[in-house]
Image (cartoon, grey):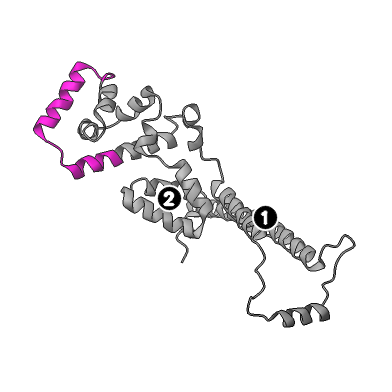
Amino acid sequence: MSSLLRYKKSGGFIQLLSLIETFGPQKKDKFLEMIEQESPTWERALREKMLTFERIFSWPEEVIVDVFKQLQPKTLAFALQGIKPEQREKILTYFSHSERRRLDDILTESKPKPEEIASTLVKVVEQTRKMLKERTLHAEKFDSALSIPEDYEAKLEERAAHDTFATMSAAPAAPAASAVKPQVKAAAAATHKPEVNVDGTPVDAVRAGIDVIQLQKKVQELVRENKTLKDENHALRGKLETIKKIA
């Protein structure tokens, strides 16, 4: 069964992305490898849009501080223990003395365990994703690659279809079987001369090229029809909900 099928609907990409961002490194890599086997196009897109701690700390300091200041005090105190000392100091310079004392008091009262620190680091990523969704953070100002356009799922499916046909078109023809004896090959060549065009191009090769082009066009049509059906289905559901409320 397709592991991507449920996420190909509108909004599914960001739902899948948000889920993967909560995974640990090993589970994340294994899951992405599984997706790559099904659709290299989706796997590349997920990696391109994914939030990581390394990515967050590549942004301007004021953006990073905006994220950390949205955390609850205990979550903030624990999260600061999970980052590099130089990163911690950069963030703390934006906090007042009273705020820093409060964080020290939290750590004095409750020293975090490694698993608690790991959990709070995930919360930092979740908080960042939430702020991006709510447009509290504007990715286009500091990391334009994070932007996710409307109908991104349909665009990915169309891109995946193009990638598939490009791979098929570029694949070399299968070599002749080496087990066939030379005299048999010669006899076959003598009795069957391939039909060619005026320019010497084999007719079969031309036909194959036309078939691939026709298939590409058909896939594009199917992608567009699928999107139209989804939009109509969404509109009908809205009307049905309205009718139920009236009734």
What is the number of the mark on residue 16?
Answer: 2
Above-or-below relation of 170 to 90? below
Q: Say which amino acid is labelled 1.
A: Gln
Image quarter for residue 112? Answer: top left
Residues in magenta, as a range: 93-122
Taking the image as shown, residue 50 lies to the left or right of residue 201, namely left
Q: Where is mark 1, residue-wise?
A: 220
The residue most toward the right is 198
Above-or-below relation of 241 to 185? above
Q: Position of residue 32 (x, y in %)?
A: 42, 53
Q: What residue sits 82% from the left and 72% below the top?
A: 194
Mark 2 or mark 1, earlier in chain: 2
How many C-alpha atoms fall within 10 Å of the one at disc 1: few (<14), some, or many (≥20)?
Answer: some
Q: Say which amino acid is labelled 2.
A: Leu
Q: Position of residue 33 (x, y in %)?
A: 42, 56
Taking the image as shown, residue 93 lies to the left or right of residue 209, namely left
Taking the image as shown, residue 118 lies to the left or right of residue 246, namely left
Q: What residue sits 43% from the left and 58% below the top?
A: 34
